[in-house]
Amino acid sequence: DAKTTQPPSMDCAEGRAANLPCNHSTISGNEYVYWYRQIHSQGPQYIIHGLKNNETNEMASLIITEDRKSSTLILPHATLRDTAVYYCIVSANDYKLSFGAGTTVTVRA
Amino acid sequence: DGGITQSPKYLFRKEGQNVTLSCEQNLNHDAMYWYRQDPGQGLRLIYYSQIVNDFQKGDIAEGYSVSREKKESFPLTVTSAQKNPTAFYLCASRQPLDRGRQAFFGQGTRLTVV
């Protein structure tokens, strides 16, 4: 699996958009980009995933650059409940799913 | 309700004893995973299984063993060979490719070895 690089932490104001970057410069053509988040002491929760095109669901939007070497997760209106560790993962059609250290996002009132 | 069940939530063992952590899923997923998480750290992959009676080592398999005799169950044994077994252990199962490959996690077992 390709490695990912995320900033260790970031702050965001409540009600504002949170833009979480992820670099995956060695991503292969068959690898998807997945985002999960983990609220303290709970199991991670799936947010969104994509291959080439931008994706949006009820939780977030995923913007993938044309060369697929980086992506951004956008939380459109951050709330205090969005405070969590966010993991960016790239995974191919095989079964291995490896997490990195993630970005600790703190939403402040 | 469908989901991943890990039991128990908290587990205490004496040093030198083997201990088995339970993970059951009723989502009909073929793929299952075990992760370890230490305080302030990310998740590290211990073992994963693509299908019944098959499993592969992850990134930190030493001192751990698994079995996959049933589709629904993927127990993890922490052996006495594991040098630092105290950690938070998470189990997951994953959808097949044609349904998005989303992973679902249990609520974890916090193991303390004294």
Image: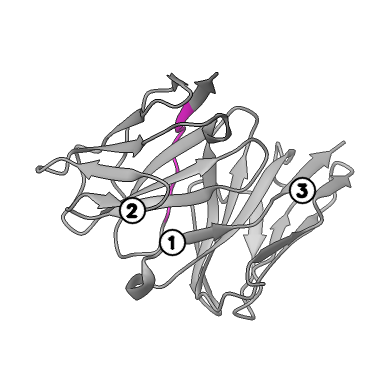
Question: Which residue position is annotated with label 3?
Answer: B80
Question: Which residue position is annotated with label 1?
Answer: B102
Give the Cα separation between the discs numbered 1 and 3.
33 Å
Is most of the magenta stretch helix, strand or loop?
A: loop
> In the picture provided, is B2 more to the left or to the right than A59?
right
User: Local crowd at mark 1 within 10 Å, few (<14), some, or many (≥20)?
Assistant: some
Do callouts 1 and 3 point to residues on the same chain?
yes
Marks 1 and 3 close (CB-CB < 8 Å): no
Foreground of the two, A44 or A94: A44
> In the picture provided, is A29 more to the left or to the right than B71?
left
Name the quadrant containing residue B68. bottom right
Question: Which residue position is annotated with label 2?
Answer: A49
Q: Position of residue A39 (x, y in %)?
A: 60, 38
Chain ID of residue with mark 2: A
Marks 2 and 1 close (CB-CB < 8 Å): yes
Amino acid residing under circle 3: Ser
Residue under the point 61% across and 48% down? A43
Give the vertical position of B36 relative to B68 (above or below).
above
What is the magenta range?
A: A97-104
User: Local crowd at mark 3 within 10 Å, few (<14), some, or many (≥20)?
Assistant: some
Q: Position of residue A20 (x, y in %)?
A: 35, 31
Do callouts 2 and 1 point to residues on the same chain?
no
Q: Position of residue B24 (x, y in %)?
A: 68, 69
Residue under the point 84% across and 45% down? B16
User: Local crowd at mark 2 within 10 Å, few (<14), some, or many (≥20)?
Assistant: many
Q: Farthest residue in the front direction?
A: A15
Chain ID of residue with mark 1: B
Residue under the point 80% across and 51% down? B9
Residue B36 visible somewhere in the drawing: yes
Badge 2 element: strand
Amino acid residing under circle 2: His
Foreground of the two, B86 or A81: A81
